[in-house]
Amino acid sequence: MTIQLPVLRKTEITITGGGGNSGDADSKTWEITQIGNSFMDMSMEMMSRTSLSLYYEHLQVIVISEEVAKIGLEDVTDFFTREPEMRRRVKVFICPGQAKSILDVQPRIEDYSAIYLAMLPMNATRNSRVIYKTDLGEVISNIHEGNDFVLPRIISIKDEIKASGGAVFKKDKMVGWLNEIELEGYKFVRNTYQNGVITVKIPNKERGIASMEISNAKSKITPIIEDGNVRFDVEIKVKGNYAENVDIHTHGELNDSFLNSLETEFAKEIEKICMQTIERMQKEYGADIFRFGNVLRYKEPAYWKNVSNRWDSIFPNVDIQVKADVSIILSGIVK
Amino acid sequence: MINNIKKIIDKKNKKTGYAENTEHLKKFVLSEDINDNVSRLKEIMNNSFDVKSREFNVGGSNVRAAIVYIDSVSNEDIIMDHIIKPLIISYPATTSKKLDIQYIKDSLLTGQSVKEAETFDEIVLSIMSGNSFICIQGYTKGLIIESKEYRGKTFATPTMEPSVKGPQEAFVEMLKINIGMIRKRIRDPNLTLDMSYVGRRIKSEIVIVYIKGIANDDIVNEVKRKVFSLDIDGPTSVVQVGKLIVEKPNSIFPLIQLTERPDKLVSSLTEGRVAVIMNGSPDAIILPVTLPMLMQSADDYFENWIVSSVIRMSRYLALFLSTILPALYIAVTTFNPGMLPTNLALSIAATRVGVPFPAFFEALLMVITLDLLQEASIRLPKIVGQTVSIVGGLVIGQAAVQAAVVSPIMVIIISVTAVSSYTIPNYSLGLATRIVRIPFMLLAVTFGNFGITMGMLLMLTYLASLKSFGVRYLSPISPYRIRDWKDTIIRAPSWAMTKRHEFLSPEDTRRQIIKKRGEPNEN
């Protein structure tokens, strides 16, 4: 376990005339790494190394390495669940390689990488490739309900941290990664899509691409039972604005038929993304991160009773159809 | 034990025998010799230099008469024109040794009021309060003629309760002028003024003012009983009278409302409250007192009701802040830092690096400094007052922070506390929050937020238990009477206030009849 502690230096009061000392080489944080058998042990041991006691109420993020996540999260989160000083709003991230490498990065706009990391998921309201609300509380409830879930993946490159895709968990064990596009698909189907951008080639033209800014996306999953077999219809309703076109002039061409053809193109793209994600989950990981099982449970409880204990083996072969319905509301004024 | 102490005090009172110079005067009556009378009067008043006397012949006769008065409290023009002049000039020439006293009283003296007196206690009190005394050779009765004139300022502007709009008139030290200010605002014959002399030596006029038919009779009688039965040496101000008549004289929360604004007094009277005013005192006290009333300011009624409601709510917030803000800071930084957002916690912690004291001592230091500054700025003459603000501002604001004795956040906390306490309209209530602050800080440092909560509960329990002339201190909030909330935390529009406050149990509950908003009534 490595804990990043803020190291506070006395704030300087700038007196008029005095020069600012911006080239401060002092590090603002101090990372203590401790090896031990239990978190409580390690926590106590750390207190023998600092003059102050550790205070967890302000814990910002927990970064868990891929290696640990593959073994299972239940053991790891136990301490964080029981300890009364812990807050359920602590953000949880999974990173490939050493978790400490993330904390080593000194972000440019925050003093502490921990706070930087805690703020990062807030961008989910604008960026569809970031997962929102992946706090400890949700992880714990997922583990205890036996759900499959996704946690954000965090990577560090030199002096930058990036939220990139997600880690797929089956029960409490990590089984693999989602890339950023798949994450978008996951958010579409799971009905957690907030805002984002989708870009396609403009149909019937030789060149040019168009982007749409999605402002509202709703998905509806309907289970259909036929001959004792279940299949799912996923209906995604997307509303958004025509945001940008590149490498093409559309002056005077933004008429209804053009926009309609674009809408179909966007819809195709969304369907493609979703299907790709669903297929990968079914074939590769067998993880029901979209909660199709849950939908079945409250829409067809009788059927769910029969299949609930076999769901893991049924899910990979279930037929799932995705249908997207895109409407462009504003096309903007260009003069 | 207490009884024993009382007995001892009673004994001491008997020994010192304050009454020696007034009580025994009852026994003395006027003699027929005017010289005798005059010299005795002067002797009683210890031959003070401003005791004036003059002897003269009445009319053309040889009958001697003497007049005694104190020139510093009486109007000498009145004495000359309305007493001495008619007696010397207008009395019909006679050779008789006997004069017609009834004739003098009824037809000659043109003073405001004339009455006969025989005993010295009555005569001395009259002379002391500015009246003139005439005695005539051969008579054992004298005449007391009204000739009072108090000198003092006749006009003042409110300094303790300033307002932006509305009347800018304040009570002065003279009773007559003060009563005039009240009378000119209420032309209701039911306005009742009950006067009595209170105080053994000072013997000042104390007046209880109320509107008969609105004020609850029980409250009026209770105030009368308590004020008129006071047996004290001498109150120099009506405040001292107020302190003596309240139920819990040890309470730090003000149980009397002091006001210098006649308009405020009048609006209290129309609510059904009772006021006490006293000669020589530029304040009036209003009874019974409730806490929400102390949070009202005259300006609330001169602004739109939404505006004044918001302002009043901010005032309640200020009351809360000025009581517990330093305590909250201590509790949050030392006990419950988890309650702060992380970034704020970090910046507070960063400012506290290098401060040698724990948060409690830091806060205590600043609170004490603040109290000293406040006290100094009141006591100092106005000319040097600026020095305090400069020294205080520099010492607290900058030097202390730069010397790392206190943290900058602490300075902000204390400033907010101080500013909040200045927004409380009632000065005494502001002082009370100053006192309560420190126990709250102690609770915060020992029990954290839990301690503050418990302290708050205790204080509220205490406040709810206080009574002022039978009315609960926190009414109408506790006991809960939603209909009376129209003038507490919010200030309802005036068309909504058709009933008087129930908690004052007024004899007449209806304040006004408004049939349709914004339009005059038909009848």
Image: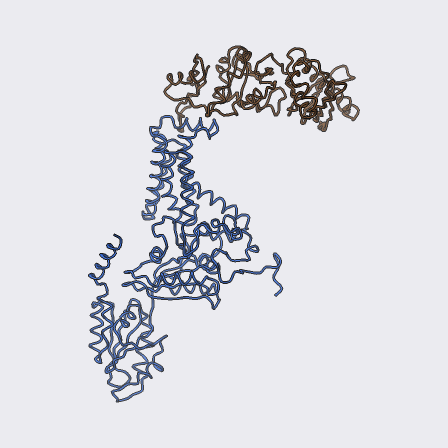
Q: Number of callouts in the render?
A: 0
Q: Is residue B479 visible?
A: yes
Kindly identify the residue that appears in the image at 32 percent across and 61 percent down.
B230
Q: Nearer the viewer, residue B124 or A224?
A: A224
Q: Is residue A335 visible?
A: no
* Residue B187 in picture, x, y percent from top left: 48, 66
Left or right? Give the position of B249 relative to B161: left
Chain painted in blue in the figure: B
Kindly identify the residue that appears in the image at 39 percent across and 44 percent down.
B433
Question: Relative to residue A50, is residue B289 depicted above or below?
Answer: below
Left or right? Give the position of B2 relative to B413: left
Left or right? Give the position of B344 relative to B238: right
* Residue A270 in picture, x, y percent from top left: 71, 19
* Residue B121 in picture, x, y percent from top left: 26, 71
Q: Nearer the viewer, residue A100 or B375?
A: A100
Display colour for chain A: brown
* Residue B484 in picture, x, y percent from top left: 51, 53
